[in-house]
Image (cartoon, grey):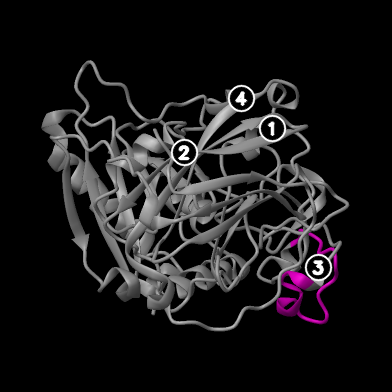
Amino acid sequence: MQLCGFLFFSCLEVSIVFSQEKQFRYDDFFTDGALRINLVRTGNYHSSTIRIHSMFKETYWSGCKTKTIEPYDYGNYKIYVYDSSSNQLIFTRSWSSLFSEYIFTEKGRTEPKSFEEVVRIPFPRKTIKIIFFYRKNDIPIWLKQDSAYINPKHLVLDAPLVPHDMDVQKIIHAGKPENVMDIVIVADGYKPGEKQKFIQDAKRVIQYLLHCKPYKEFRKFISAWTVFIPMSVSDSMLCSFNTLGIDRYLMTERVFLLHDYISQIPYDFIILLINTDVYGGGGIYNFYATCPSDNPYTNFLVIHETGHSIAGLADEYWTSEVSVKNFYNLNYEPWEPNITTLVSFEKKWSSMVKPKTPIPTPAVATWEKEIGVFEGGGYSEKGIYRPSYDCSMKSPIYDNFCKVCQEAIKKVIRFYIN
């Protein structure tokens, strides 16, 4: 692709401190639609680079038009978008990806590999400057990696690949995309004659989410779409088990193609629904979530994996096999809202802990119903703490988010609704 209309600059690694920006009118800087930027991130634990692979103009920007600066500091990667003439900060977005997990695997420590990532912004009205930031490995400090100037008047944009036999339906209508949170459920592994099965599966799965606390409080503000792409005998599925060497980890590296499929509808969050009864799934913050259609634990899996992808929640277990090693640095406070190393606990849920609750909190019946600081979480038995005795981010129990996880989910939903 010929990437006309932007300049790309490499920058030194420097830590950044951001200040609150003044308010502005959305229409002064953005027009209709969204600019999708396809990125390729390449490297290993020791070093990485990013490059813009391609860009597309999508029909809808579904995010809230009165709130474009994120109020939370989640994810492993982030962009800051500035109006180039005034240097006004007009947009931020953060996310994580498979690359941020790969580098903590045995191979990822030394072997370089490339991963696809997608970041979307409202379509700019005039020239913008994008600054790319990342957190280096297990140190949750933002570093500047690259920057680009993009002039929308001079862009040469690719057209997304849309299958001719794709079927799109809106199964829940809550309002205009910019006023609600839009979730898209994408079929994977369904054959041409299984469209109705997929629609019924998708309706069941979205109800699992909407009947779970705290989503049930916001049911009137959540829309849902389905995208059915039939899989013929010669086609391969997007997702596969054994991602990063873990049998139950069900993910896709074909991120560009996934976003091509959903490019004609408004969406804030993605659920890939896989036509299987095998236990598995996955979820990465502001990336996507996956779950099986017909497993006895599908109701739990969809809320657990979207806990990752929507709210950036960490896993609170430590006994199950995982692909990553030493994922959290105990000398720093992790960015995820539901775990702590007690390095900067005052920035987490300390205000929700009652004065008489001991810190750390013993995992005994006395404190079973209380918000506390229970040791064990984030794949580590020692040194990382979770907010509650049990939670849907710890154990395979449906509708059991602790109050801390519920508040984290609420914070994200409120950002997307108007």
Q: Counting other residues with Cα less than 10 Å from the Cα at mark 3, is it few (<14), some (14-19), or many (20 or more)? A: some
Q: Earlier in the sequence, mark 3 or mark 4?
A: 4
The x and y percentages for residue 26 are 42, 77
Nearer the camera: disc 2 or disc 1: 1
The x and y percentages for residue 79 are 58, 56
Residue named by callout 1 = 103
The picture quadrant where one finds residue 407 is bottom right
- Position of residue 200 relative to residue 253, above or below, is below
Identity, as a three-letter code, of the amino acid under mark 1: Ile
Residue named by callout 2 = 281
Nearer the camera: disc 3 or disc 1: 1
Q: Are marks 3 and 1 in contact (CB under 8 Å)?
A: no
Identity, as a three-letter code, of the amino acid under mark 2: Gly
Disc 3 versus disc 1: distance between alpha carbons? 27 Å
Region in magenta:
347-364
Residue named by callout 4 = 113
Q: Earlier in the sequence, mark 3 or mark 1?
A: 1
Q: Are marks 3 and 4 in contact (CB under 8 Å)?
A: no
